Amino acid sequence: MNSDRLSVESAEPPRFRAGRMALVLFALIAMTGGIVWRFDLLSTGSSRLPENSIMVIKPYRYEGTWVFDDESTGLVREPFVAGVPEMIDALVSDIPHADEGFRLLFSARAFPGHQKKLSWLRGDAGGNYYELDDPKMEGWICPAMFKYYETAPQELFVKAEPID
C-alpha cells in the first residue's frame, strides 16, 4: 500500500525557464501595444491634421452670419465673428448663392489655386487675429481653429469655390 502513495518529498519543484517567460512577456507587451494603437488610447484627444494638409469646410449663412458644421470635430453652426464675416463676403463675391453654402479650402501652407493669404497678427481671448492683404481687413478666428492646428499658423491660405 505504501508504494501507491505519492511522496510529496520526492517531487521536483518546477524549473524556471527564462526563455519561455521572456516569450510570454514579449507577447503581452505586443498585445498591449496593439490594443493601445487600435483604440488610440495614448492620444492627446487631438484629431488635428498636419499643417501641410488642405482642409475643407462648407460655410453657409445662418441667423445673419456665416457659420459652418464639421462633423469630424464636433462643430455645429460654429460662427465666424469679429471681421471674418466681412472677409468671407469679399472672398465669395463672385460665387452665386454663396449664402446657401460654398466650399472653403484652407491650409497653413500655400497650395495651387489659393485665392488669399491671411497673416497672423496677434492672439486675443483664446483666438487669433489675422490680416487679409487685399482688400485690407482684419478678423478674429476663434479657438475652434485649434481643432485643426496645434498652434496658430503664421499664415493661412484660403480658396472659396461653389458647391457643385
Image (cartoon, rainbow, N blue to C red):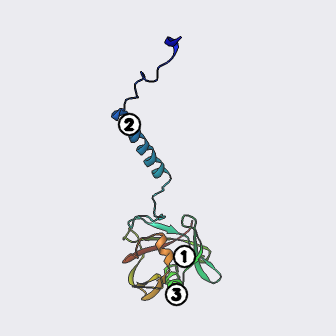
Estimate the spatial distance between the alpha carbons at disc 2 and disc 1, rounded to whole Å.
68 Å
Label 2: state its secondary structure.
Answer: helix
Q: Nearer the viewer, mark 2 or mark 1?
A: 2
- Mark 2 vs 1, N-terminal side: 2
The residue that mark 1 highlights is 95
Q: What residue is drawn where x is 40% and y is 76%?
A: 152
User: What x and y, as percent, mark residue 65?
Assistant: 60, 82
Identified by mark 1, the residue type is Ile
Q: What residue is drawn where x is 59% and y is 73%?
A: 101
In the rendered image, the quadrant that contains the C terminus is bottom right
- Mark 3 vs 2, N-terminal side: 2
From the viewer's perspective, tell me whether residue 64 is left or right of residue 118. right
Q: Quadrant of residue 124?
A: bottom left
The residue that mark 2 highlights is 21
Q: Which mark is residue 82?
A: 3
Please, is residue 88 above or below residue 7 in the view?
Answer: below
